[in-house]
Amino acid sequence: MGGQACVLYGAAEFSRDTDLALLADHENLTRLHAALDELGAATIAVPPFELQYLERGHAIHFAFGDRPGRMRVDVMSRMRNVDPFPALWERRTTLQLPGVGDVDLLALPDLVQAKKTQRDKDWPMIRRLVEVNYLTFRDNPSDARILFWFSELRTPSLLHEVALAYPHGVLEAKQKRPWLAKVNWERKQDIEIALMQEETAERTADRAYWAPLIAELASLRQAHS
């Protein structure tokens, strides 16, 4: 669900860790614990590896191997404005990698939604992910893809291109992006302003979502020390 997923979708990103979304229940966490033990992985930082923290939206961090080749695995179960795990699993993307086998990824729309955070590095990645999808499939559009492009493209020139090719798509996407129905497509600056306002609203919402979680982590660190 993180940088490694972005790489597999064709949007290059350098990532030293692997981020996993998982079903948080006791049986599944028991299996995860066994797998991590096999790797020799240990929990690092806070919170501890407990179901209650995953259910509240925290990430739990693990590391294995010797420095400097140490590997990180971060797991989460709940993300802001992202559907619960069973829905994510139902519409996942499965790739088959030579020498590895099946690898399950968040569906691209879910990955894009999960990337809408307060972090600076996530927004260029969202732009690249949707650009790659559009440039790959623009000659083979479907209703679902057209709606995805209208809803998530962050490149003004490509968004304009989609609007010219599929004017009906504006009506379908305006529930998520009301400004699509009002923007002057000939004015690139208007599109850029709308996209920046959208990003600012998402960053603000993410900060509000994380504020109580960060406060809880601070309390856990203090208790641990």
Image (cartoon, rainbow, N blue to C red):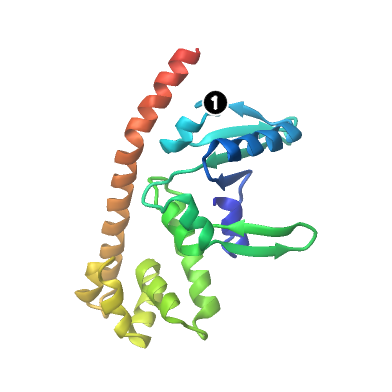
Query: Can you see residue 115?
Result: no
Residue drawn at the location 55% of the way across and 40% of the way down: 75
95 sits left or right of 127 in the view: right
x and y, in percent, of residue 169 in the image: 32, 80
User: Which quadrant would residue 187 be assigned to in this image?
Assistant: bottom left
Query: Can you see residue 104?
Result: yes
Using the image as rendered, state which of residue 124 and residue 205 is in the foreground.
205
x and y, in percent, of residue 219 in the image: 40, 19
Q: Which residue is mark 1?
A: 45
Q: Is the residue 145 above or below the residue 198 in the image?
A: below
User: Which quadrant would residue 119 be assigned to in this image?
Assistant: top left
Using the image as rendered, state which of residue 69 and residue 72 is in the foreground.
72
Query: Which residue lies most toward the right here?
Result: 99
User: Which quadrant would residue 42 be assigned to in this image?
Assistant: top right
x and y, in percent, of residue 163 in the image: 33, 81
Identify which amino acid the numbered label 1 is placed on: Ala
Residue drawn at the location 38% of the way across and 82% of the way down: 161
Q: Secondary structure at mark 1?
A: loop
Q: What is the crowding at mark 1: few (fewer than 14 residues within 10 Å), some, or many (at least 20)?
A: few
Residue drawn at the location 73% of the way across and 30% of the way down: 40
215 sits left or right of 106 in the view: left
Using the image as rendered, state which of residue 179 and residue 212 is in the foreground.
212
x and y, in percent, of residue 166 in the image: 35, 85
